Image (cartoon, rainbow, N blue to C red):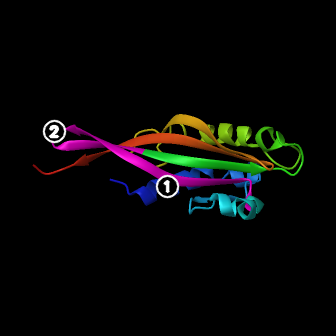
Amino acid sequence: MYTIEQIEDAIIAALAPLKVSLGIREIKSYQGELEEADLKKMAGNFPAIYVVYGSSGYVAHGARKQEKMGFELFVCDKTLRVEAEARRGGAKNPGTYRMLRECRSLITGKNLGLAELTPIEIQHDTPVWFGGGVSIYAQGYETAQAHLYPS
């Protein structure tokens, strides 16, 4: 059985190549960086991807339970030029649309080296914030693992 921290770290490690290929400045566990009061200050770290555990649900199978776990990525970019460039990308930024595509290709269908984890599946892409040259999307994923409980 893997801890939330182990799975979150595996997701962050899987996304690490985006630092080079897309010039992502930060890929890390979410620590409240996107609070509206701090957004202007934090936008200086964009493009960025923040990973956070969302929730778990449990399905019983006798002495076994399957834990379905949800994780969210906050995919963030900014531009000082044309507003749409934060989403579509430009000469100096990848744009959130491209970041979403690249995250999907690195994570979807993989267990990230955690052998007992089911392949991670994408659940949604949801807009979170647009304005002031900032674009933020939440990208949701789900995976599962089994637990054995003594009877």
**Residue carrying label 1:** 8
Write down the region rendered in magenta.
45-69
Q: Nearer the viewer, residue 124 or 3?
A: 124
Secondary element at tag 1: helix
Farthest front residue in view: 37
Q: Position of residue 135 (x, y in %)?
A: 73, 46
Q: Is residue 46 above or below residue 111?
A: below
Look at the image and say whether residue 128 sits in the magenta stretch. no
Amino acid type, residue under disc 1 in the picture: Glu
Q: How much space separates mark 1 and mark 2, taking CA atoms?
A: 28 Å
Identity of the residue drawn at 56% across and 63% down:
31
Secondary element at tag 2: loop
Q: Is residue 54 above or below residue 59?
A: below
Q: Which mark is residue 62?
A: 2
Amino acid type, residue under disc 2 in the picture: Gly
Can residue 1 be spotted in the picture? yes
